[in-house]
Amino acid sequence: AVDTVVLDKTGTVTSGQMSVVSVEPAAGVPDGELRLVAASLEHASEHPIARAVAALVEPVAVESFENHAGFGVSGVVDGRRALVGRPAWVREQGVDVPSTGSGTNGRDHTTVAVAWDGSFRGTIAVADTIKPTSAKAIADLGTLGLEPILLTGDGRAVADAVAAEVGIERVFADVTPADKLQTVRDLQAEGRVVAMIGDGVNDAAALAAADLGIAMGTGTDVAIQASDLTLVKGDLATAVDAVRLSRATLRTIRANLAWAFGY
């Protein structure tokens, strides 16, 4: 009965294997110091962007660590009270983040801002790659009569670039985990039957609220537990197979019932 498929971007449409493409310290900030603070703070987070940043250098211990879901992380690194996360969120914490740190360093990069002791210290840009099967799988979902929608916490430019490459027209960008949940509920309020496909902690609430929650088997345990169905290979093409199989199963059930009542 599903007619709408909401897709998380990172780890679902894309590989989720993020890598750092640039480190840009603010004036007077040593490159090594920026890397150390950012990597240490992100080390405790499971987000793909965090894992990429954490791999920059060997981390040191962090005190008073806090994960602000969908926004960033904070804590004390070597006596510095530090923040790493979305530039807009870091700005909301009272840090003067330059407008160039607005969320992207290009169409395929996502940027996080780094600050400590109340001052902006630099940005780190990471990039992801689209899974080779995603575009065809999304086209196949459309052939089955399902509308694909991209839902991501990444910036608008990154989201639009990925959506254009895989053939998705409707995009929600810069969303928080709460926004993802609300988007699913809004679609349901329109009378849609919604499937949500995701892989991360940030997707768990939306997966649980959707009429059908589908988790990537390569994702987090929280996402898998919150979903109804798990794609063991973590491949969107398997989701297409699942829809086809379920429809074929229903056709068989109806045919069997018709023959049974006729007999």
Image (cartoon, helix red, strand yellow):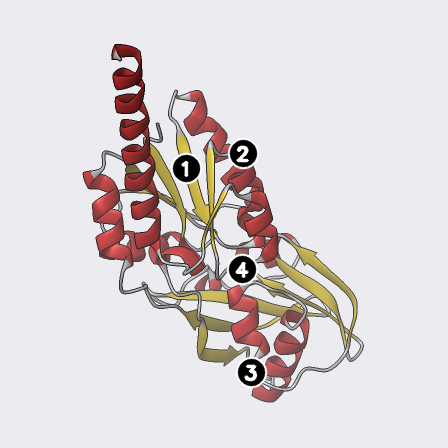
Q: Does any portion of residue 170 appear in the rendered image?
A: yes
Q: Nearer the viewer, mark 2 or mark 4?
A: 2
**Is the residue marked by circle 3 packed among few (<14), some (14-19), or many (20+) residues within 10 Å?**
some
Amino acid type of the residue tagged 1 in the rendering = Ala
Give the spatial CA distance, label 3 vs label 1. 36 Å
Q: Pick out the residue farthest to the front.
A: 263
Give the spatial CA distance, label 2 vs label 4. 29 Å
Amino acid type of the residue tagged 2 in the rendering = Ala
What is the secondary structure assignment of the residue under circle 4? helix
Residue sitting at x 62%, y 75%? 38
Q: Which mark is residue 195?
A: 1
Above or below, 7 against 235 in this view is: above
What is the secondary structure assignment of the residue under circle 1? strand
Residue that numbered label 3 is attached to: 56
Q: Earlier in the sequence, mark 2 or mark 4?
A: 4
Res. 96 image quadrant: bottom right
The reply to whether discs 3 and 1 touch (Cβ–Cβ < 8 Å) is no
Classify residue 236 as left or right of residue 99.
left
Q: Which mark is residue 87?
A: 4
Residue 227, given in percent of the width and then of the height, sits at 53, 43
Classify residue 240 as left or right of residue 233.
left
